[in-house]
């Protein structure tokens, strides 16, 4: 995992609308960058809805929320629409950005081995420095945990 105090790796990725989003667009603002394995699965939906349900609290603190998975743009668009997600979802189909954040690699599920996204979160400060790191997070209550830590 990248550690607090490290410079956050820069990136550009397409969002759920197919528009390119760069981390540099958020300079001067705190960012919650959360990596999740798959849109519209139970854990990922619970995590995303947690951020949605706490959206006003993040907005009040001027904190941007960016969710990253290796899902294609169309899947992200459907996920965002189905659950009325007010924040940006980013498509990292080849896992390159997730890998730069130590959040992509070999996984085992139901006896199958494959490459995928790990459920990790980084809080990036307004100067682009990693402020907090959450590894292998539980989707339940994660948004609230971050808000508590930010206060």
Image (cartoon, rainbow, N blue to C red):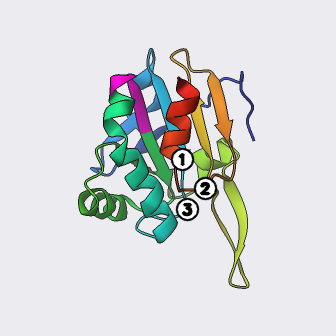
Which element is circle 3 on?
A: loop
Which element is circle 2 on?
A: loop
Which element is circle 1 on?
A: helix
Q: Is residue 70 visible?
A: yes
Discs 3/2, front: 2
Instruction: Classify 10 Å Cα crowding around label 3: few (below 14), some (14-19), many (20 and above).
Output: some
Could you tell me residue 57's position as x and y percent? 36, 32
Answer above or below: position of 66 versus 71.
above
Answer above or below: position of 26 versus 79.
above
Left or right, residue 34 beside residue 14? right
The residue where tag 3 is placed is 37
Discs 3/1, front: 1
Q: Earlier in the sequence, mark 3 or mark 2?
A: 3
The Cα atoms of the two marked residues, 3 and 1, are separated by: 15 Å
Q: Nearer the viewer, residue 2 or 115?
A: 2
Residue at the image point whose x is 25% and y is 54% from the top: 84
The residue where tag 1 is placed is 142
Left or right, residue 59 beside residue 43? left
Residue 69 sits inside the magenta stretch: no
Residue at the image point whose x is 28% and y is 44% from the top: 86
The residue where tag 2 is placed is 138
């Amino acid at each position: 995992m990248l550690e607090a105090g490290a410079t956050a790796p820069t990136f550009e990725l397409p969002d759920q609308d197919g528009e390119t989003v760069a981390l540099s667009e958020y300079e001067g603002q705190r960012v919650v960058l959360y990596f999740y394995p798959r849109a519209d699965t139970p854990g990922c939906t619970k995590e995303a809805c947690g951020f949605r349900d706490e959206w006003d609290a993040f907005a009040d603190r001027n904190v941007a929320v960016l969710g990253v998975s290796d899902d294609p743009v169309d899947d992200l668009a459907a996920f965002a629409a189905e659950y009325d997600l007010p924040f940006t979802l980013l498509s990292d189909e080849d896992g390159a950005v997730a890998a730069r954040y130590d959040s992509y690699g070999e996984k085992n599920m139901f006896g199958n081995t494959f490459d995928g996204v790990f459920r990790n979160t980084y809080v990036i400060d307004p100067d682009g420095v990693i402020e907090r790191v959450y590894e292998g997070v539980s989707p339940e209550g994660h948004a609230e945990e971050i808000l508590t830590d930010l206060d």
